[in-house]
Image: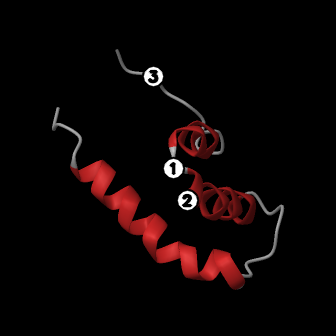
Amino acid sequence: MLVVVRRSLTPDWAVERLPSEHRAVLSHARAIYLGEEEERWSGGLRSGARPCADFLVDAIGQQPLR
């Protein structure tokens, strides 16, 4: 079954499924995308961005091709 979801809602779905150490990074990225926050990556957000991206790329790569 194919489910179409607005792009602005997709990170909410994904954040709920992420390990806790990656949630703040994706939530912040979503807020920037929606114009709710300025793009400032400092402290834990900055150091967590690469591990979060690596986790997401790996998780996507493990999905079966359709």
Residue 46 in the image, given as x and y percentages of width and height: 61, 81
Residues at marks 3 and 2, CA–CA distance in whole angstroms: 24 Å
Q: Nearer the viewer, residue 18 or 65?
A: 18
Say which amino acid is labelled 2: His
Q: Is residue 26 above or below residue 7?
A: below
Q: Is residue 23 above or below residue 40?
A: above
Whether residue 41 appears in this view of the structure is: no
Would residue 57 appear left or right of 31 to someone viewing this image? left
Q: Residue placed at 55% from the left, 59% from the top? A: 22
Would residue 47 appear left or right of 1 to someone viewing this image? right
Residue sticking out furthest to the right: 36
Q: Residue placed at 17% from the left, 37% from the top? A: 64
Q: Which residue is mark 2?
A: 22
Q: Which residue is mark 3?
A: 3
Asked whether disc 1 touches disc 2, contact meaning CB atoms under 8 Å apart, the reply is: yes
Residues at marks 1 and 3, CA–CA distance in whole angstroms: 23 Å
Whether residue 44 appears in this view of the structure is: yes
Say which amino acid is labelled 3: Val
Q: Residue placed at 70% from the left, 63% from the top? A: 28
Choose mark 1 or mark 3, whichever is in front: 1
Q: Residues within 10 Å of mark 1 (few under 14, many from 20)?
A: few
Asked whether disc 3 touches disc 2, contact meaning CB atoms under 8 Å apart, the reply is: no
Residues at marks 1 and 2, CA–CA distance in whole angstroms: 6 Å
Q: Nearer the viewer, residue 17 or 31?
A: 17
Q: Nearer the viewer, residue 52 or 30?
A: 52
Q: Which residue is mark 1?
A: 19
